[in-house]
Each structure stands twice: as C-alpha cells, then as structure tokens.
Image (cartoon, grey):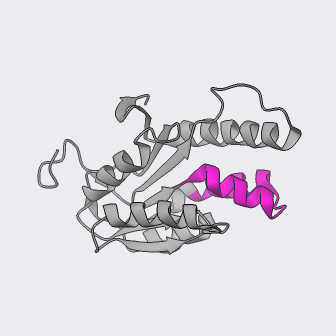
Amino acid sequence: MSKSQPSSLALGMSGMVTPLPPVTLVLGGARSGKSRYAEQLVDRHPGRRTYIATAEVLDAEMAERVKAHRDRRDSDWKTVEAPLELAHALKAETEQGAAVLVDCLTLWLGNLLGQDRDVDAEIDGLIVALGQFGGPVVFVSNEVGQGIVPDNALARRFRDLAGILHQRLAEKADHVVFVTAGLPMKLK
C-alpha cells in the first residue's frame, strides 16, 4: 500500500486525516518482524512521525539493536526516549497530530518493574490516556505468554502483567495484529 492510496482514512483528534486508526497494537514474538511491520504502518502517515523508544541502552549488544532500528527508518523520524514516562511522552508527541510508534511495551514493563514502580497504576494511566492522543499511535509488544511457565516469581509476574496489558490495550485498540515469521495476521 502506498502513502498516496490508503485503504481507509481516519480523522485524529488534531483534525489531521490519516490512513491510520487512532490506536493499533502489533504483537509478536522475538524477531517476528513486528517492529518492521509497525514502522511500515506509521510510514503511511502524511505528517510528522515519532518513534518512542522504551529501551535503555545498557550494553554494546543493545546499542547495536538500537542502531539497526534507527538505520531502518528515514531520517525524518523523530526519536524520543521514554523508558518510564510513556503516557506523558505519547500525549506530548501526538499533540499536533504526529503519528507515534511505541517500541516496545514489554521493555517498558520491565523498566517499571526494575524501578519498583506501581505497574498496575502505570498500566491504568496508559489505558486512560488512549482517548487523549492527537494523532495515531502504533504500539509494539512481545507476546511472552505462549511459552513455558517461568521458574521464578518475577518472571511469572512480568508474563502476567504483559498479558493483562495486552488484553486491556487490545480491547481499546481499533486495530490489533499478530506478526509471526514476518507475516501479519489481523486479529481485530
């Protein structure tokens, strides 16, 4: 699908017409192609595009991953790092109708747990903020609940929180896609 021929148009709170629905959730496993798919969705947006990165670069391997993601995007994408204050960053970046890609929610959850934040309250805040965005948002997240039950309480809590977040966000999202082997499957 080209930028000039979107299949359907939506009107964001900012009044900008965009081929993206207000909220999209893209789920998938590690290296499933979910980030690349989400970037292609946001590339359709005729206005500003912002990439909200939730990752914290703590080692050389993560720095290489971040570089690969940046190299894949056009230079006109704005990058905002928001490892913790996601709802605030989303409101600020969509204010003038920018399309925002959040990559990724599971890293955000891990950051919240690592900082001993009230994760339930943070999830509530994100869900409440969904109706306050001035532009479309595409969330990317890892589906972590399809494997074995983790052997420790923290990993089980993380898996459970990710599942709860995904369910709550999917309920509110206009469009939900599961990506596996680079192939998107529309769920909603």
| Residue pictured at 75% horizontal, 36% vertical | 160
Magenta span contains residue 110: yes
Region of the chain picked out in magenta, as a range: 104-129
User: Which residue is at the front of the view, 88 or 158?
Assistant: 158
Q: In the rendered image, which quarter is residue 108 located in?
A: bottom right
Number of marks in the image? Answer: 0
Horizontal and vertical percent position of residue 129: 59, 59
- Look at 35% across and 45% down and name the residue there: 37
Q: Nearer the viewer, residue 31 or 59?
A: 59
In the image, is residue 185 above or below residue 31? above
Does residue 18 show up magenta in the picture?
A: no
Residue situated furthest right in the rendering = 153
Residue at position x 78%, y 32% from top?
150
| Residue 179 locus on image (x, y percent) | 42, 34
Quadrant of the drawing holding the N terminus: top left
- Which secondary structure type mostly characterizes the magenta part of the structure? helix
